[in-house]
Image (spheres, helix red, strand yellow):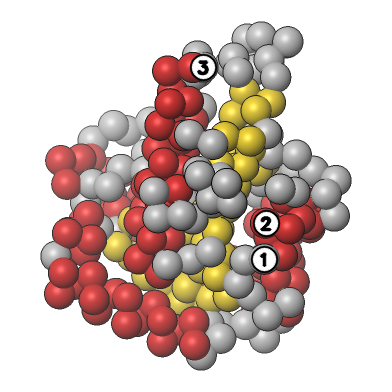
């Protein structure tokens, strides 16, 4: 199935934006990329689709805003940076979506929110209400209250949890890589892009996965795990290079490539 049809046939779409996509080479927020993504989300909304964003970037925005502590490993400093950066991140989303008359809503979630049925129900209700009212929820982990032991840890997992909770039709993960390759493309020039994955769980044993990149948390491993999680519910996942301008738009024109995790849907 073509990417164009997959996106066109999906009404409820979760889009996860990684820190690598949102940051420039110095680790500050790349506003041009962010603006371009918001533009494309606005187009999807204009086509009658409903969108939830799962956005990383609190950490990098924090470094950008306060210009210190970037190398401090202490958890309290990391939490402080995210607390500062989350405000910056939302201010930027508010400004860009505001240009299209779209309201955004911040939802900061933790692992506990998904393991306690009462809390999960409350999030679900808030999420559905926002979407019904035409608001775009922007979700991130509540980093300033989550210590390592209880953290979801990476937003690929958070995006997969959000996708199944909302019962979305499609999860799009925007990363700084074109998709999953058969070898690590950074060290192998002959690495080939795998465009269709039918069994995400098996994939990890079939390819040699590279490490995580400099700003992101999960690397390719957590993306494959996210795909396995949503595929289990019959929901496809699309991994695209969000650093490339108009990537969603171009996917809808069938002029971009990525990795589509289909599971066994459509077989
Ligand atoms: N929640 C973290 C942040 O906003 C990012 C987690 C991740 O990179 O997956 O900085």
Where does the image place residue 139, in percent across and percent down from the top left?
Answer: 42, 64
Vertical comparison of 205 with 158: above or below: above
Q: Residue at x 15, y 74 (%)?
A: 118
Where does the image place residue 214, in percent across and percent down from the top left?
Answer: 50, 28
Vertical comparison of 169 with 245: above or below: below
- Density class for disc 3 (Cα within 10 Å; few <14, some 14-19, many ≥20) is few
Which marked residue is nearer to the observer: mark 3 or mark 1? 1
Q: Earlier in the sequence, mark 3 or mark 1?
A: 1
User: What residue sits right under mark 3 in the picture?
Assistant: 207
- Mark 1 and mark 2 in contact? Answer it, CB < 8 Å: yes
Q: Is residue 2 or residue 56 the one in the foreground?
A: 2
Q: Secondary structure at mark 1?
A: loop
Q: Is residue 169 or residue 28 the one in the foreground?
A: 169
User: What residue sits right under mark 2 in the picture?
Assistant: 6
Q: Residue at x 34, y 81 (%)?
A: 126
User: What residue sits right under mark 1 in the picture?
Assistant: 9
């Amino acid at each position: 199935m073509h990417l164009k049809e997959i996106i066109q046939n999906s009404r409820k779409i979760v889009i996860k934006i990684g820190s690598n996509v949102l940051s420039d080479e110095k680790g500050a927020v790349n506003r041009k990329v962010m603006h371009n993504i918001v533009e494309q989300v606005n187009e999807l909304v204009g086509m009658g689709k409903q969108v939830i964003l799962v956005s990383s970037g609190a950490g990098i925005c924090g470094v950008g805003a306060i210009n210190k502590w970037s190398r401090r490993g202490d958890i309290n400093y990391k939490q402080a940076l995210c607390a500062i950066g989350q405000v910056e991140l939302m201010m930027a989303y508010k400004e860009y979506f505001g240009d299209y008359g779209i309201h955004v809503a911040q939802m900061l979630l933790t692992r506990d929110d998904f393991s306690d049925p009462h809390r999960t129900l409350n999030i679900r209700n808030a999420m559905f209400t926002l979407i019904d009212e035409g608001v775009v929820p922007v979700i991130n982990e509540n980093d300033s209250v989550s210590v390592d032991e209880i953290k979801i840890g990476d937003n690929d997992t958070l995006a997969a949890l959000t996708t199944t909770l909302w019962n979305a039709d499609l999860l799009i993960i925007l990363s700084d890589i074109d998709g999953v390759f058969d070898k690590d493309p950074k060290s192998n020039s002959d690495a080939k892009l795998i465009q269709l994955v039918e069994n995400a769980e098996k994939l990890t044993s079939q390819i040699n996965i590279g490490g995580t990149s400099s700003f992101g948390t999960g690397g390719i491993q957590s993306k494959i795990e996210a795909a396995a999680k949503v595929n289990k519910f019959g929901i496809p996942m699309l991994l695209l290079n969000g650093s490339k301008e108009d990537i969603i738009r171009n996917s809808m024109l069938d002029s971009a490539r990525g990795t589509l995790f289909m599971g066994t849907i459509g077989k």
